[in-house]
Amino acid sequence: MRRAEVSRQTKETRITIILDLDGSGTVQAGTGLPFLDHMIQAMGRHGRFDLDCKATGDLDVDAHHTVEDIGLVLGETIKKAIGDSRGIQRFAHAVVPMDESLATVALDCSGRGFLVYQGCLSQPALGGIERDVFEHFFHSLCVKAGLNVHIIFHGKNDHHQMEAVFKAFGIALGEASKIVKGREDIPSTKGIL
């Protein structure tokens, strides 16, 4: 069973995430940030994994700590659910259009966290979240999960761009982490990820 639960509590945030990689796309998100809830729901729904994300944070300060810590906890949960990577696809990519916007995500469950993020939102903030915090979210997630991810996006509408990114990330993660029928090895020439 590829299901994991991780909780983290600091003086700034309290977060619990439950992830089932073999789910059907059922998502519950309660972060105190409706736009982030919408993005998490899109990611899980299109990635076809079940996800329950509950978070409280110091939103009276700003969204940074909450968004960053959700990325950290989600990354740790993904890593725990994938386990030793035995039998997984490992590599995947997705290209998602949303009206005038287009997002491409290429993902490797390599065990080595690295993010390339190319794209720019036009407004200073989106849904109460400063635009640079979205890159920080994905960086935190990738480092904790051990994922090598390239995110490239463009468009005119910030909502469309970011929604396309989250959907593409979900699809790529769902595909890369899926079990390949008949494969029982660890997908690496090194024998370990």
Image (tube, rainbow, N blue to C red):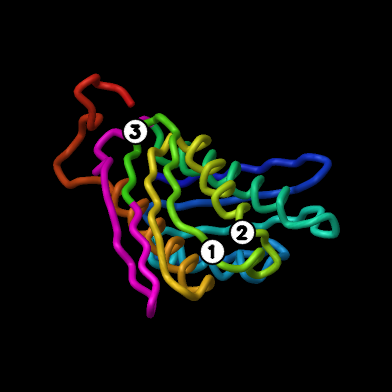
Residue 60, relative to residue 4: is it above or below? below
Question: Which stretch appears magenta?
Answer: 84-105
Spatial CA distance of label 1 from label 2 is 6 Å
Front residue (pair 45, 149): 149
Q: Is residue 95 magenta?
A: yes
Q: Is residue 44 magenta?
A: no
Residue 100, relative to residue 172: is it above or below? below
- Mark 1 belongs to which amino acid? Leu
Q: Residue 131 bears which disc, if any? A: 2
Spatial CA distance of label 3 from label 1 is 28 Å
Q: Residues within 10 Å of mark 3 (few under 14, many from 20)?
A: some
Q: Residue 150 bears which disc, if any? A: none
Q: Residue 143, image x and y in percent? A: 50, 35
Q: Residue 141, image x and y in percent? A: 52, 43
Question: Which residue is denoted by mark 1 in the rendering?
Answer: 121
Question: Which residue is denoted by mark 3 in the rendering?
Answer: 110
Front residue (pair 22, 69): 69
- Mark 2 belongs to which amino acid? Arg
Q: Is 9 left, or right, of 86 in this rendering?
A: right
- Mark 3 belongs to which amino acid? Ser
Q: Residue 103, image x and y in percent? A: 37, 63
Label 2 near label 1: C-beta < 8 Å?
Answer: yes
Q: Quadrant of the N terminus?
A: top left
Name the mark nearer the viewer: 3 or 1: 1
Q: Quadrant of the C terminus?
A: top left
Say what secondary structure mark 2 lies in: helix
Residue that protrudes farthest toward the left in the picture: 182
